[in-house]
Image (tube, helix red, strand yellow):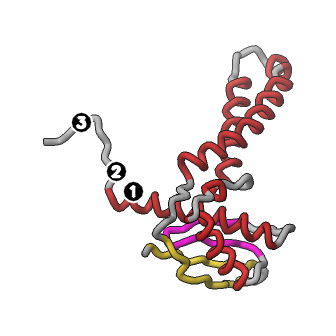
Amino acid sequence: MEQRGKFRMPVPILSLLRRLRQHHALEHATIHVLTQRYPNLRVVGRSTPDGFALYGDLPTEGVLLAAQHALKRLQAGQRNLAIHPACGTNFVAAGALAGLGAFAVLTPRRRGWRDWLSRLPTVLLVATVGTLLGQRVGILLQALVTTDPDVGSLRIAGVVREERGSLIVHRVRVREE
């Protein structure tokens, strides 16, 4: 008998989402470790179903060691490493709150451009507050939605360096034991 009103997520999709959240946590932890070793590091990460990619000029051996160290630290319970202040989740949350706030203030009221212009300071204030709150909301979203620091059964399978012109990418492969 079919149940109405209940949506069931297929198991393979749930498994993929959990894996992506774990990889995202490990990506963040690896960036934290790399930042400690290379203080002026400029790197961007992206989680994938088979691990994560780091974009930036880094030594391959350093990426491997950092990923292994990050994994051990997460497995030892350092859950805070799964959250990163420069995560795209923070930027999306900040942009969404700023944009929605500005939209709410600027919603047309059919009073002409002077009315619209008079609301501009309020728009700037609301957008600024939205941006500031968005950073906090982004951290919360990382903790609750986009990362999973429970990486107990994962292991680093290897790191592959790819160069495309000036773009350097390290693909960190992760396996489940």
In the shown orientation, is residue 67 left or right of residue 35? left
Which secondary structure lies at badge 2? loop
Q: Nearer the viewer, residue 164 or 59?
A: 59
Dot placed on the residue nearer the N-terminal end, 3 or 2: 3
Dot placed on the residue nearer the N-terminal end, 1 or 2: 2
The amino acid marked with disc number 2 is Met
The amino acid marked with disc number 3 is Arg
In the shown orientation, is residue 121 left or right of residue 12? right
Residue lying furthest top:
111
Q: Nearer the viewer, residue 110 or 135?
A: 135
Q: Which residue is mark 3?
A: 4
- Kindly check if marks 1 and 2 are in contact, taking CB atoms under 8 A apart as contact: yes
The image shows residue 68 at horizontal and vertical percentages of 62, 76
Quadrant for residue 61, please give it: bottom right
Q: Which residue is mark 1?
A: 14
Q: Which residue is mark 2?
A: 9
- In the depicted structure, whether residue 19 falls above or below residue 109: below
User: If the image is split into quadrants, where does the N terminus sit?
Assistant: top left
User: If the image is split into quadrants, where does the C terminus sit?
Assistant: bottom left
Considering the whole magenta stretch, tell me its main secondary structure. strand
Residue drawn 67% across and 68% down? 30
The image shows residue 160 at horizontal and vertical percentages of 62, 84
Q: Depth-wise, is mark 3 or mark 1 nearer the camera?
A: 1
Q: CA distance from mark 3 to mark 1?
A: 21 Å
The image shows residue 48 at horizontal and vertical percentages of 54, 68
Residue 36 within the magenta-colored segment of the rendering: no
The amino acid marked with disc number 1 is Leu
Residue 54 within the magenta-colored segment of the rendering: yes
Residue lying furthest front:
76
Residue stretch in magenta = 44-56
Q: Nearer the viewer, residue 17 or 152?
A: 152
